Amino acid sequence: MSFDKDAQDWLEAELADTLDEEWEIELEDSILSREIKKIYQKEHPDMLERAVYFRELLRLQAELIKLHDWVEQTGQKVVVLFEGRDSAGKGGVIKRITQRLNPRVVRVVALPAPSNREKSQWYFQRYVPHLPAAGEMVLFDRSWYNRSGVERVMGFADEDQVEQFFQDVPDFERMLVRSGIKVIKYWFSITDEEQQMRFLMRIHDPMKQWKLSPMDLQSRIRWEDYTKAKEDTFARTNIPEAPWYIVEGNDKKRARLNCIDHLLSQFDYYEMPHEEVHLPERVYNKTYERAVLPPELYVPSKY
């Protein structure tokens, strides 16, 4: 009886820890200067209720676990691209997708700027090593579409290179699909005013200032150039084998839920059977004595 009570208390504590983890992530989006927060709430009066958001997020994450098991056990190969303007919410949805999944099965790829050696290679070469093997799902936080986006707008690629990219990328993605890789492409769309608001939030939030790079600030100046680049990208790379899906991103919470729900809808997955797990009895050795370790090996208990 005592053991059952202890087990119940332990499970309740674990559940509380899980909810605390959700709150930690949510607070990341809430630690703002008071004035900026007031303005944000004024601009978003119909924000999704926190209770509704968490209920749906946890439900969708439970489905993601089923998808994760199905991908692993049936040997699926999946690539999901996340593109969009700076601060559009790509990182937020990726974080919620991967939060409860095994990183050996579902991993995130966010490549830095190419090195001089990589610049001399075939453009797609540095992405190829990150493609999935059987039983894996790879989420690209920005992808080869850097060429038709930031590289084009910022002048890191000339028009001949961009044109070559547009000619090559449909064939490249068709090759991936023919090889058995499912390719899903998301574009997170936000308005000019929303991006400005989010940049202001980052400027006034010390915990988020690291997210602002000189390149991000340039994106404000070149808003219209990015718009033209986006339109050209859609027009020339929206192929039946790998179509684009636009996620309306002005409301972060709704964007996350909508994207995860749509991602799940792209697969005819089903719940995989699992062997019942039994916790084995611990083996006790009467002659064993636990060694006393030096106190300096322990992390100080400040909290």
Image (tube, grey):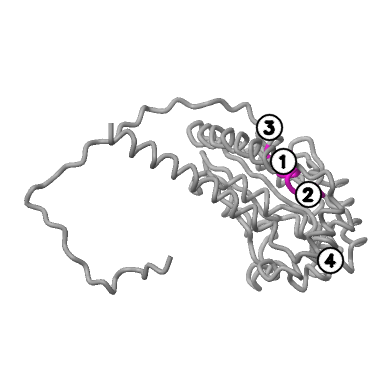
The disc label shown at residue 234, or none: none
The percent position of residue 92, horizontal first and vertical second, equals: 68, 52
Dot 2: what SS?
Answer: strand
Per the model, the C-alpha gap separating discs 3 and 1 is: 11 Å
Q: Main secondary structure of the magenta part?
A: helix
Span shown in magenta: 249-260
Residue at the far left: name it: 287
Q: Mark 2 touching mark 1, by CB under 8 A?
A: yes
- First along the sequence among labels 4 and 1: 4
Q: Is residue 159 left or right of residue 108?
A: right
Residue underneath mark 4? 219
Per the model, the C-alpha gap separating discs 4 and 3 is: 32 Å
Tell me, yes or no, whether the highlighted magenta stretch contains residue 253.
Answer: yes
Residue underneath mark 1? 259
Judged by depth in the image, the label closer to the viewer, 3 or 2, is 2
- Residue at left offset 68%, top offset 68%: 113
Work out whether 206 lies above or below 197: below
Dot 1: what SS?
Answer: helix
Mark 3 Cα-neighbour bin, 10 Å: few <14, some 14–19, many ≥20: few
- First along the sequence among labels 2 and 1: 2
Mark 1 Cα-neighbour bin, 10 Å: few <14, some 14–19, many ≥20: many
Per the model, the C-alpha gap separating discs 3 and 2 is: 18 Å
Residue underneath mark 2? 188
The percent position of residue 84, horizontal first and vertical second, equals: 78, 53
Q: What amino acid is labelled 1 in the image? A: Cys
- Residue at left offset 57%, top offset 43%: 137
Residue underneath mark 3? 266
Work out whether 150 lies above or below 73: below
Q: Is residue 5 left or right of residue 120?
A: left
